[in-house]
Image: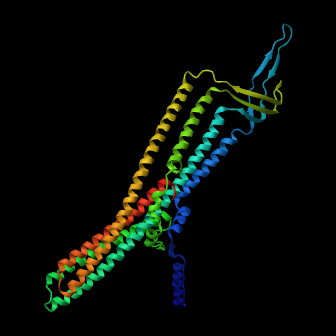
Amino acid sequence: MRTTIIIIFLWAILLTGRSYGQERLSLSLEEANNYALEYNKQVKNASLAVEQARKKINESISAFLPQADLLMDYSNYMGAEMQFSFGEGVPPQTIPFNPTSSLYFRISQMVFSGNFIVGLQMVRIYKEITGTNYLKTRQNIIEMVTRSYHNALVSELSIKIINNNLYNTRQIYENTKAMVSVGMAEKLDLDQFLVQQSSLENALKSAERQKELSYNLLRFQLGVPADTPLELTDSLDYFLDNFDFPGILDQSFHLDNNLDYQVILSQERLSEKQVNLQKMNYLPTLTSFYQYTNKILKPEFDLSPKNVIGLNLNIPILSSGMRNAQLNQARIQLETTMNNKSLLEEQLKLQERQLRFNLANAIDQYVNRKNNVDVALRIYQNYQFKYQQGVSSSLDLTISNNNYLQAESEYLLSIITLLDARLALEKLMNTL
């Protein structure tokens, strides 16, 4: 009986482990971007900032709407009295100060406030800035996920190339070993291939570490646990064959589409409103109110009315230069923002030219290095055939193999450079 219970308990643990195990996540690049935009913490925080700005607008609008307050007070004069004297022969009259308590109901309404009007406009501009920052955050996440996706695919291709070359090197090593045993080859040739094999094994381990790093970075950007298995369904050939890289170079660049430029435009408008806000400090403020008073504990003489309606007018007269100093500071800040906008315009135009040059150069480099791989592979295969026929040395085969691996390494680097150059230009143009 006890054994049966233990077996059932272990079986329950196994079932629980299966039910909570991480399932493989298969994603195309588009699906990976959508997944990251839904679960990434940075995107969530940017979305919360937009919602907070919306609530800030509601808060500012509510300040212009009627405000109602209910107040209650209590006063005790500690037995104080007031005496009235009516002349000689007339005894003085004593009036005690009895405790009093009143209940006030007050409604106020702002009639005019220049600061409030301009402040509400500033809050709306602030909401636009947070909205643009949200779009920038989404854009950055898409860029990082796409780059990590590309790097993961390139690392897989690198592992595949090294494995194929390692397999060939091991085959040659075994064949050479057999030839050495019968005296048809020198042991020096065998040592040469053993060094080559060891070098490839180290390169394979390095590529596997790079692959794990790329996948971990992608998991972090997706917002999934570190032990989640990932399967990338888009191939590297899909990105290289289906993207119109020269067509991207033909697209025109519009400053207004760039998100950084949109932010600086909003900041310039915000600085203009700040100047207007300081100007409004010179204007009066007018509010209206209604107050109802209910006497809970009345004094001996109560002449105050229950219902009062009135206006409060606040006219600024003298601030000893403070308002003027604040206005001048706001004007300086506006001029600084305008200079920053002009500087950003120049930077973006120069960046566009540089990124177009980088992409054009990356396209030429990719085509050239892809051809180099084909040539280096044919040379290596030719030397491999000659070595098997005994008309080529092991040194020639090793050199041709190293040249081929170097060509493959440069080709992989050109792929990353090409895809990164496309990403950078599309981000600048806000077409990601």
- From the viewer's perspective, is 20 left or right of 304? left
Residue nearest the observer in this picture, 226 or 369: 369
Residue 424 appears at what percent x and percent y?
44, 57
Q: Residue at x 52, y 59 (%)?
A: 41
| Residue closest to the eye, 282 or 261 | 261
Residue 83: quadrant of the picture: top right
Q: On screen, 5 above or below 358?
A: below
Quarter of the figure with residue 295: top right
Q: Residue at x 18, y 89 (%)?
A: 179
Left/right placement of residue 224 relative to residue 152 reads right
Location of the N terminus (image quadrant): bottom right
Q: How many marks?
A: 0
Residue 381 percent across, percent down from the top left: 27, 80
Counting from the top left corner in percent of width and height, residue 78 is at: 73, 27
Q: Is residue 382 left or right of residue 21?
A: left
Q: Residue at x 33, y 71 (%)?
A: 371
Q: Position of residue 259 (x, y in %)?
A: 52, 50
The residue that appears at 13% across and 90% down in the rendered structure is 183
Which is nearer the eye, 92 or 375?
Answer: 375
Q: Is residue 242 visible to us here?
A: yes
Q: State which quadrant residue 88 falls in.
A: top right
Left or right: residue 96 versus residue 326 is right
Q: As drawn, which residue projects farthest toward the right?
A: 90
Would residue 201 be visible to someone looking at this image?
Answer: no
